[in-house]
Amino acid sequence: MTQSALLDLFRQRQARVAGPEEAPFLLTTGSVPAEYTAAREQCVLFDTTDWEQVRVSGTEAAVFLHRLLANEVKNQPDSTRRENMLLSAKGKVRFSFTVERRGAEYFICTSHGQAKPLADALEMYHFSEQVQFAVTLEWARVEVCGPQAAHVLQAVQPAVLPALPPTGLSNVVDTTIAGLPCRLAAALVAGSLGWTVDVPRAAAGQLVAALEAAGAHLAGRVVKDSLRVEACHPEPLLDIDEGVYPQEARLERAFALDKGCYIGQEVVAKIDTYGGLNKRLVALRVSHEDPVPRGCKLIKVEEGERRELGLVTSWAWSFVLDAGLVLAYVKRRHQAVGTVFELEGGGTATIVPTPVRPDAVLPTGDFE
């Protein structure tokens, strides 16, 4: 499992880390409320240097990926990045990622620990095509967001920043920050409009230092979870797995209905045409302050019968609501704002309007 390229920096600052011993991640640099305030009023950067990439090359790379993946690949312009997925034959999400085209090569960026399984999954569909797969950790990524993020980035590289259009197709700009070669692209960061900055892995600490000198604040997983849960923004491996359809997880920007056949396409198209989703990801306010574990059931009594109508996938503290907030998949006909459920283990959860933060962007692609 890939480690963060910034672990030494975290240890030097005596920051709080958590997670498995072989791949810990930053929880907080010290004050969670201060980090959250910086995210809402200034600029924060998040460590995603443990993310991994699969490089797909060969003369038939574009055709091969286009045939398998849920979003457009073959006609994707050079130096652009787009959300994409590999679905199962039943139309459910196996892997969620971004695909970046650089010349004749494609770089699939995915969550830590997922590059090798993804490469193996692609290899299963590889027959005689001229295409090769390689897991690479050459580049490391940090995410930048907040109302002052554009000012911070322009301070370290005075150029026009790439924008994120509603289609989700972002230009990737080659630039230089503090003398370091970087790749800059617009993205949704924890449910807010922001940017990703890729840098050679060995230089990740220098990049962070340059961004901090320009006014950015390093923030940890606690605040990132607060932001994304308030935005109803799903996280791969937590809110997105092989048990959900793309539309259930609000991943409409990661698939295309007009690109022709791909794995799971018939199911995705049928759902779009006829509807009938069994469940949908929503946000619910919790009646108590204790964390709610992933997998906690939402229960409602109907006609004297206790029914399991939802499943929690993420919990975070909402500074906007001053309460605990969960993301959960709730069954249809029970998704109205104000619907109250019992939480397995105690307390209640009430569906709230999303996004909770007025400055957040729903992951469906509604940028208004």
Image (cartoon, helix red, strand yellow):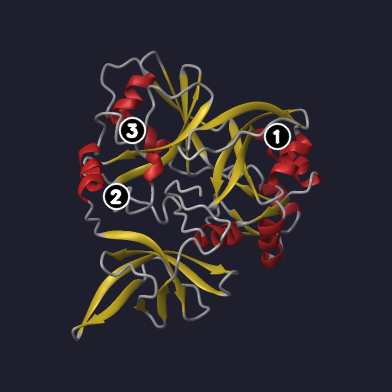
Separation of disc 3 and disc 1 at Cα? 32 Å
Identify which residue is drawn at 53% across, 78% down. 289
Residue 277, given in percent of the width and then of the height, sits at 25, 56
Foreground of the two, 164 or 216 = 164
Q: Is residue 325 left or right of residue 27?
A: left
Badge 2 marks a residue whose secondary structure is loop
Position of 114 compared to 275: left or right? right
Q: Is residue 77 above or below residue 296?
A: above
Q: Residue at x 18, y 84 (%)?
A: 303
What residue does disc 1 label?
Answer: 203
Between discs 3 and 2, the one toward the N terminus? 3
Q: Which mark sits nearer the N-terminus, 3 or 1?
A: 3
Is the residue marked by circle 2 packed among few (<14), some (14-19), or many (20+) residues within 10 Å?
many
Q: Secondary structure at mark 3?
A: loop
**Please, what is the three-letter code of the amino acid marked with disc 3?**
Leu
- Mark pair 3, 2: CA separation: 14 Å
Report x, y in % for residue 99. Answer: 45, 32
Asked whether 262 or 123 is in front, the reply is 262
Spatial separation of the CA atoms under disc 2 and disc 1: 38 Å
Report whether residue 343 is seen: no
Query: At label 2, which amino acid type do we have?
Result: Tyr
**Quarter residue 137 falls in:** top right
Check disc 3 and report the residue beneath it.
69
Residue sitting at x 58%, y 53%: 24
Which residue is label 2 attached to?
245
Q: Name the residue nearer the viewer: 192 or 325.
A: 192
Judging depth in this view, the residue of 163 and 266 nearest the camera is 163
Of labels 3 and 1, the one closer to you: 3
Q: Secondary structure at mark 1?
A: helix
